[in-house]
Each structure stands twice: as structure tokens, then as C-alpha cells.
């Protein structure tokens, strides 16, 4: 079928794909992962993986999507061969599984924005109790429903009228809000202590395998590399778009936003909080999932002596968080929707199925924060496999052929050299093998019952859930390949 929809301009494509990358992963997830992994110690492997994992995979996703004009299942099947349709299906499954609980987190952001605007949030005496009461109630379910429904409405309108229009409003608004918060944070008394914590490495922590694993998964979370999301948006890019330039802009632009968010949050924490509060922030577990929702509201109360000013900063922070969540959730819903479109459904029917399924399968995460933490762990690590499968597809196609014909093809001003062959062909597979092996071996020391599939965050639960999903997809590989390649997409 001939491609029907395109982004109207390169600017529109860049804004939309930045919207994928800049999400709550930069604020909600990044700040808690940094706190759990030694502050500045975490930034070293995080920057390394940007260069040798995220940017190369973003280039790959742009190239595959632009050339195949199909979602991840069809694109990887077309690129690697019909025997490997299950790999594309796994990429889709991982991003969709993340979508289920990401919609819940989007709902949290909306709920806290409303509480900030009303002034209720700043009148709370005990924010930990407030968070626990909210998280254990049925409210997250309601806001999860609102979030997935709102995003479904945008996606239903298509690429130009929906995704493009929404991201042109949301992404610039988000950036303006973050810059306002950044300048307020760094001008607080003792903010420099937070900046020192954020940028000063502890070399003993740097050598911890869990820090490197978290750095890779966070980088994938941050940039959207390996999710198949950028691949999906690349379907709608014009033939003369520059693949390498777009990829570099997104990778470095995204990580810059993460740095700004990190400086803002840690400057605020150290300027206005006590050592005890910082110790609480660095603890893992469900309470840490609520880092942004527990400790920052406390700090917003201390920003100034004016209740109106405090309410303003709290409101725009949670508005920014909500905008960030929505733009990322949009890409996840579009990926799932596009997959069903490739299976022959029209957009209206596909979005209906995805909305209902997304709501129902997000219910466990909405009602149980430990379940959400488990899913974040299992499918966050799953992004490593997704990235490996995308790299494998290019190897099957022929890395040099892919680089010269697809990446350096029509519309490319910046040509990618042979170094790319070595990163995709050698370095990314080595990273996957070393990190997963290192993680499996060291996981024995993290948890004596590392094999137990019913623990929230250990190796056993990851292996158990991955095995179930991969087995099903491999068994149905022929059906998936035939259905995707032999069906006309109906936009």
C-alpha cells in the first residue's frame, strides 16, 4: 500500500520524536535511578551508553522505519527475513507492556497537577502518607483511564492532525517550563551541594555491575532507543529526511533535558531538605517510585515565603511532568496501533482495541505499586533484548549495505562512516552478552532467591516472564510473518 501520511516538515518530525524521548523517564525515572546508583557515579556509564548504544540504535530505527514503511513487526521481518518476525513482535510487546503501566504514571502526573492547582497538595502535612493513600486507593485507576483515553483521542486523529499538532504544543511548553524550574532551582541557597552530588562520582560505585545495567536501561528509557517507537514515527518521515542528523539531535537533545531535570531536582532537594530526606530518596522500593511525588511537593512548600509562588512552581512542575508523559505515551499507543494497522485493521478499530486492552492490562499496576515496579524492572531490562534484535536485523540485511543505501541514502547530508559497522556488528552484541551475563552472575548476590519468579526485582522474574513471551512469539512466528507481510495496511 502506498504511504498515505507524512509529517509536514523536518521540524514536525524532530518535535514529535523529541516528544518520544523526553518523557517522565527524564524526570520521574531518571532522578530516582540516579539517586539509587550513586549520583555522579551513574552519569559515567550513562554517557558512554549514549554514544555506543542509544545513538547507533536511533540511527538504525530511523533507517529501518524509513525504508520498510511498516511498524516494528513488519519492518524487522522485511529487514531480517520472515524467520525472525518474532523478534519484531518482541520489540512491540516490550514497548506495549511498558505502555500499560506508563499510562498509570501519566495519570499520577495529572492527579498531582490538579492537586497543585487547587492548592490541596501544599496544605498536606505528611506527603508520604498522602502518596501512600493515593497509591493504595482506586484513584490511580480513574486517572489511568483518563490518560489512556486522552491519548487514544489524539492518535485516532492520525499523524498530522493528531500527533503533530499535539507535540507542537506540548513539547515547546514542556521545555519552557523546565527552563523556568531550572533557573529557580539553581538560585536556591546551597543548591551547589545538589549539583556536586549529581556530578561527583564515587569510583567504587562505578565498578558495580548493577549501575552499568541501570545506566544502559535508563539510556534506552531516556532516548527511546530500542523501543521501536522512533522506528514507528520514521514510517511517516519523508524520503529526503537526514537520518543521522535527526538521530544525533534526538540523542543529545534528550540527554541534555535529563541533565537539566537532574540539576533541578537535586539542587532543590539539597537546598531545601535535610540529610535524612536525601537518605530516604536513595532508598529503593515502592516508596522511591514516588520520589517525585513525595519529596518534591514538600520542597515546593519551602521555595519561598509566598503560598501563591509555591503553588505556581508546584503546578508548572507537575504540568511539565504530565506533558512529558503524554508525548511519550502517544508514541507507545501509536506503535501498538500501527502494529494492528499492519495486520489489516483500520485506524479506528485498531485504536479501539489498543485503548481497551491498555486500560485493562494497566489495572494491576494502577492498583498495586509493587506490580508496577516489577513490570518496570522486567521490561526495562527487556529493552536490552529489543535493541539487540534491531541490531541483529541490520546484520541479517547487511550492515554495510544498510549504512550506504539506507542511512547514507537520499536526503542525507551527514554521511556515516564504517565505524557504524563495528558498533552495530560487534560492540552492541558484546554489550548485550557482557551486561546480561554480568547481571545474571551478580544477581545471585543481590537476592539469595534470585531464581524466584515471584520477587519484584530479581533475575528470576525477568527470565520467567521473558521465556513465556518469547516462547509464544516463536511458536506463532509463521503466522505473525504471513499476517504482516501479506496484508495491506489500512490507514
Image: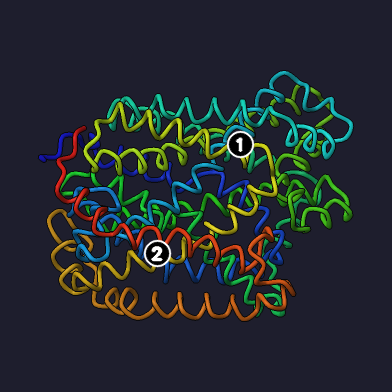
Q: Which mark is residue 387?
A: 2
Where on the picture, by quarter, is residue 110?
Answer: top right
Helix or strand or loop: what does disc 2 sit on?
helix
Is residue 317 found left or right of 77 in the rendered image? Answer: right
Q: Quadrant of residue 196?
A: bottom right
User: Can residue 139 be seen in this snapshot?
Assistant: yes
Q: Quadrant of the C terminus?
A: top left
Q: Earlier in the sequence, mark 2 or mark 1?
A: 1
Disc 2/disc 1 C-alpha distance (Å)? 35 Å
Q: Is residue 256 left or right of residue 38?
A: left
Residue 159 rendering spot, x and y as whole percentages: 29, 32
Residue drawn where x is 34% and y is 76% of the image:
423
Front-lying residue, 167 or 82:
82
Mark 1 Cα shell of 10 Å, populated few (<14), some (14-19), many (≥20): some
Residue at position x 48%, y 36% in the image: 358
Across and down, in percent, residue 57 comes to: 36, 63
SS type, badge 1 = helix
Residue 225 vs 354, above or below: the answer is below
Q: What residue lies at 55% left-to-right and 59% top-to-bottom? A: 218
Up/down of 265 relative to 448, above or below = above
Q: Which residue is mark 1?
A: 180
From this view, report whether residue 310 is shown above or below residue 382: above
Q: Is residue 58 depicted above or below 323 in this figure?
A: below
The image's colour scheme reads rainbow
| Residue 271 image position (x, y, % from top left) | 80, 48
User: Which residue is rendered at x = 46% and y = 60% of the image?
Assistant: 383
- Residue 186 appears in the picture as rendered: no
Q: Quick one: label 2, few (<14), some, or many (20+) residues within 10 Å?
A: many
**In the drawing, does residue 104 fall left or right of residue 233?**
right
Amino acid at each position: 500500500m502506498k504511504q498515505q501520511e507524512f509529517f509536514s516538515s523536518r521540524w514536525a518530525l524532530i518535535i514529535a520524536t523529541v516528544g518520544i524521548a523526553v518523557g517522565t523517564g527524564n524526570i520521574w525515572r531518571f532522578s530516582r535511578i540516579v539517586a539509587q546508583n550513586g549520583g555522579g557515579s551513574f552519569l559515567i556509564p550513562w554517557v558512554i551508553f549514549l554514544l555506543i548504544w542509544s545513538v547507533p540504535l536511533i540511527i538504525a530505527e530511523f533507517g529501518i522505519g524509513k525504508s520498510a514503511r511498516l511498524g516494528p513487526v513488519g519492518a524487522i521481518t522485511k529487514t531480517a527475513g520472515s524467520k525472525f518476525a518474532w523478534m519484531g513482535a518482541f520489540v512491540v510487546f516490550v514497548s506495549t507492556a511498558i505502555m500499560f503501566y506508563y499510562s498509570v504514571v501519566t495519570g499520577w502526573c495529572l492527579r498531582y497537577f490538579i492537586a497543585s492547582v487547587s492548592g490541596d497538595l501544599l496544605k498536606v502535612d505528611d506527603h508520604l502518607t498522602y502518596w501512600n493513600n493515593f497509591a493504595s486507593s482506586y484513584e490511580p485507576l480513574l486517572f489511568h483511564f483518563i490518560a489512556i483515553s486522552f491519548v487514544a483521542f489524539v492518535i485516532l486523529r492520525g499523524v498530522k492532525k493528531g500527533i503533530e499538532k499535539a507535540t507542537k504544543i506540548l513539547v515547546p511548553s514542556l521545555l519552557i517550563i523546565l527552563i523556568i524550574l531550572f533557573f529557580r532551582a539553581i538560585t536556591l541557597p546551597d543548591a551547589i551541594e545538589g549539583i556536586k552530588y549529581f556530578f561527583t562520582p564515587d569510583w567504587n560505585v562505578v565498578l558495580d555491575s548493577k549501575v552499568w545495567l541501570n545506566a544502559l536501561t535508563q539510556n534506552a528509557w531516556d532516548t527511546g532507543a530500542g523501543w521501536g517507537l522512533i522506528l514507528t514515527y520514521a514510517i511517516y518521515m519523508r524520503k529526503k529526511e537526514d537520518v543521522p542528523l535527526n538521530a544525533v539531535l534526538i540523542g543529545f537533545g534528550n540527554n541534555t533535558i535529563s541533565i537539566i531535570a537532574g540539576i533541578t531536582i537535586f539542587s532543590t532537594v539539597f537546598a531545601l531538605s535535610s540529610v535524612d530526606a536525601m537518605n530516604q530518596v536513595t532508598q529503593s522500593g515502592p516508596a522511591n517510585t514516588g520520589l517525585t511525588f513525595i519529596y518534591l511537593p514538600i520542597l515546593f512548600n519551602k521555595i519561598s515565603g509566598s503560598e501563591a509562588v509555591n503553588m505556581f512552581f508546584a503546578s508548572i512542575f507537575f504540568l511539565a511532568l504530565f506533558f512529558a508523559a503524554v508525548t511519550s505515551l502517544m508514541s507507545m499507543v501509536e506503535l501498538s496501533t500501527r502494529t494492528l494497522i499492519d495486520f489489516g485493521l483500520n485506524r479506528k478499530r485498531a485504536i479501539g482495541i489498543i485503548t481497551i486492552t491498555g486500560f485493562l492490562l494497566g489495572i494491576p499496576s494502577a492498583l498495586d505499586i509493587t506490580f508496577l515496579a516489577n513490570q518496570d524492572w522486567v521490561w526495562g531490562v527487556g529493552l536490552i533484548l529489543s535493541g539487540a534484535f534491531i541490531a541483529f536485523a541490520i546484520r541479517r540485511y547487511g550492515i554495510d549495505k544498510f549504512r550506504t543505501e539506507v542511512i547514507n541514502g537520499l536526503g542525507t547530508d551527514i554521511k556515516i562512516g564504517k565505524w557504524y559497522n563495528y558498533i552495530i556488528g560487534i560492540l552492541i552484541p558484546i554489550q548485550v552478552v557482557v551486561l546480561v551475563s554480568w547481571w545474571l552472575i551478580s544477581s545471585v548476590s543481590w537476592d539469595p532467591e534470585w531464581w524466584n519468579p515471584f520477587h519484584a526485582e530479581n533475575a528470576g522474574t525477568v527470565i520467567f516472564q521473558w521465556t513465556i513471551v518469547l516462547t509464544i512469539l516463536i511458536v506463532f512466528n509463521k503466522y505473525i510473518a504471513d499476517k504482516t507481510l501479506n496484508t495491506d495496511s489500512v490507514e
